[in-house]
Image: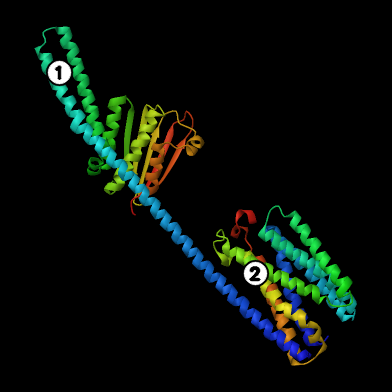
């Protein structure tokens, strides 16, 4: 790994750590949906650190294996976040369905398309498509909902925007990642830098949303 | 496809997505602002409509009171007055002392009824109340009650006295009248104290009685017409607070914004 990419990774990781520490510090005053985000951030920070160490020791298969399992859990946790945000009560069946669904998608990808020694781009693209759709749907229902008085202070809205930015920009990255990583040069450097900047901004956005989260901003059922 | 081409497509695609999301967020925020403005306007219109409806309701009621007052004054009171004069003249011509005494008592009773009716007529007449000072109208009402029903009443005035505008004065008087009537009719009170506290920001009125009181929870769900009118009027004036407990009397506090 070149020093430039190492610095880029460290910056990305610092943003993940910032978001994780903020979420853990604010955990008590968060509602169920945002506690799921806290859990996801904790998992991300651990898995990214392990992956970084694996890359340093050139254990690429271990890194890809971690990504495969991490993606399944990540997809389930983000789905849970949206389930809690859209339907705060009586959602056990939906959570179970989401878990089953993502385990099936992940397993099918590992067994038939991308084994553990390969990067799971298919799974990541499916995730991107699903979460872009859900984020847009969430923004739509927020607009329809007259209970939300001030959208600027509505944490779910900003989370939906963050997910939309993250997943809509990463979908093309996952589509071209294998080709991009094969080459070298300025364009590739720019592409990876853009992806890193978006990730850093997304995690800092999550940190800010979690830090400014206030249950008073939600309606009764959502609390 | 070469790596460099893929990187260019990715970078341009990412930037395009970012622009799209930014526009989407801006559109959402603008739409939401308009939606909120629309809801606020609708609420204001609804509030205005309700206020006008209440005003009309109260005007109709005042008209009915005025009609009743005029009927009592011009018709019933005149007839009774005539009857009283005839009875008086008749008593002068009668020689039988027992019959004469009975007729004199009857004349006095008719006279009392006439006085009561005149007082009632004045109290019902909004125009007359508006002409009098608020303190005078309340005193008149309390005197009428004390005379007619043997109830001890007291009016206390504190602060620097000023007169609310006639419309407000009439509404204040009607609220006090309703509270006093409730105290006598439902609370069976024999003592009523009214305090007018004039403050620069508004007028605070307290109507206390020693009646049987009532359970506020039962009343809130099933307000009678009188209590309903009282709340409607008070809402237009400022606010009202009723404190009551079974067998511990009732305190009605009315706050009037006189600056508006």
Residue at (85% x, 69% y) in the render: A108
Please indicate, yes or no, whether residue B147 appears anywhere in the rendered image. Answer: yes
Rendered image quadrant of residue A27? bottom right
In the image: residue B226, left or right of residue A43: left
CA separation in Å, label 1 and label 2? 91 Å
In the image: residue B96, left or right of residue A34: left
Residue at (38% x, 51% y) in the render: B51
Which quadrant is home to the C terminus of chain A? bottom right
Q: Please name the residue that numbered disc 1 is placed on.
A: B87
In the image: residue B220, left or right of residue B170: right
**Position in image of residue B200 (x %, y %):** 34, 51
In the image: residue B229, left or right of residue B78: right
Provide the chain ID for the residue under circle 2.
A
Which quadrant is home to the N terminus of chain A? bottom right
Q: Characterize the local packing of mark 1: few (<14), some (14-19) or many (20 or more) Cα atoms within 10 angstroms.
A: some
Rendered image quadrant of residue A18? bottom right
Q: Please name the residue that numbered disc 2 is placed on.
A: A136
Does A8 appear above or below B188?
A: below
Helix, strand or loop at label 2? It is helix
Provide the chain ID for the residue under circle 1.
B
Residue at (78% x, 71% y) in the render: A45
Seen as rendered, the residue at the extreme front is A112
**Position in image of residue B167 (x %, y %):** 29, 47
**Position in image of residue A190 (x %, y %):** 72, 88
Q: How many numbered circles does the render carry?
A: 2
Residue at (70% x, 58% y) in the render: A32
Does B56 appear above or below B10?
A: above
Helix, strand or loop at label 1? It is helix
Please indicate, yes or no, whether residue B158 appears anywhere in the rendered image. Answer: no
């Amino acid at each position: 790994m070149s020093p430039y990419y190492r610095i880029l990774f460290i910056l990305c990781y610092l943003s993940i750590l910032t978001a994780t520490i903020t979420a853990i510090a604010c955990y008590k005053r968060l509602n169920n949906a945002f506690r799921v985000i806290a859990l996801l951030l904790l998992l991300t920070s651990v898995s990214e650190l392990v992956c970084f160490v694996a890359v340093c020791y050139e254990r690429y298969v271990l890194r890809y294996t971690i990504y495969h399992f991490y993606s399944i859990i990540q997809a389930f946790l983000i789905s849970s976040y949206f389930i809690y945000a859209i339907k705060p009560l009586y959602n056990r069946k939906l959570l179970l369905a989401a878990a089953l669904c993502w385990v099936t998608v992940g397993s099918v990808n590992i067994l038939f398309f991308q084994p553990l020694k390969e990067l799971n781009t298919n799974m990541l693209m499916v995730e991107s498509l699903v979460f872009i759709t859900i984020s847009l749907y969430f923004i739509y229902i927020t607009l329809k909902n007259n209970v939300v008085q001030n959208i600027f202070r509505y944490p779910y809205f900003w989370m939906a925007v963050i997910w939309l930015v993250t997943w809509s920009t990463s979908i093309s990255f996952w589509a071209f990642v294998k080709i991009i990583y094969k080459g070298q040069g300025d364009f590739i450097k720019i592409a990876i830098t853009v992806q890193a900047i978006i990730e850093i901004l997304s995690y800092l956005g999550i940190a800010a949303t979690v830090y400014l989260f206030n249950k008073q901003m939600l309606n009764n059922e959502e609390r | 496809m070469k790596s460099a081409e893929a990187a260019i497509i990715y970078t341009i695609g990412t930037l395009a997505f970012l622009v799209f999301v930014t526009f989407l967020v801006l559109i959402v925020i603008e739409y939401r602002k308009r939606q909120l403005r629309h809801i606020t306007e609708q609420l204001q219109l609804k509030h205005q409509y309700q206020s006008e409806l209440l005003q009309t309701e109260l005007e109709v009621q005042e008209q009915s009171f005025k009609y009743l007052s005029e009927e009592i004054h011009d018709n019933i009171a005149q007839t009774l007055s005539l009857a009283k004069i005839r009875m008086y003249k008749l008593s002068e011509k009668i020689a039988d002392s027992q019959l004469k005494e009975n007729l004199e008592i009857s004349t006095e009773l008719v006279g009392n009824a006439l006085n009561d009716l005149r007082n009632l007529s004045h109290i019902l007449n909004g125009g007359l109340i508006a002409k009098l000072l608020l303190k005078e109208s309340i005193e008149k009402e309390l005197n009428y009650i004390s005379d007619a029903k043997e109830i001890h009443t007291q009016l206390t005035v504190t602060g620097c006295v000023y007169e609310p505008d006639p419309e407000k004065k009439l509404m204040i008087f009607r609220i006090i009248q309703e509270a006093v009537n409730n105290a006598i009719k439902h609370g069976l009170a024999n003592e009523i104290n009214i305090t007018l506290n004039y403050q620069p920001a508004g007028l605070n009125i307290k109507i206390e009685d020693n009646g049987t009181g009532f359970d506020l929870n039962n009343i809130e769900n099933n307000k009678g017409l009188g209590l309903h009118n009282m709340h409607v009027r008070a809402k237009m004036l400022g606010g009202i607070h009723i404190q009551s407990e079974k067998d511990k009397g009732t305190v009605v506090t009315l706050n009037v914004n006189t600056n508006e």
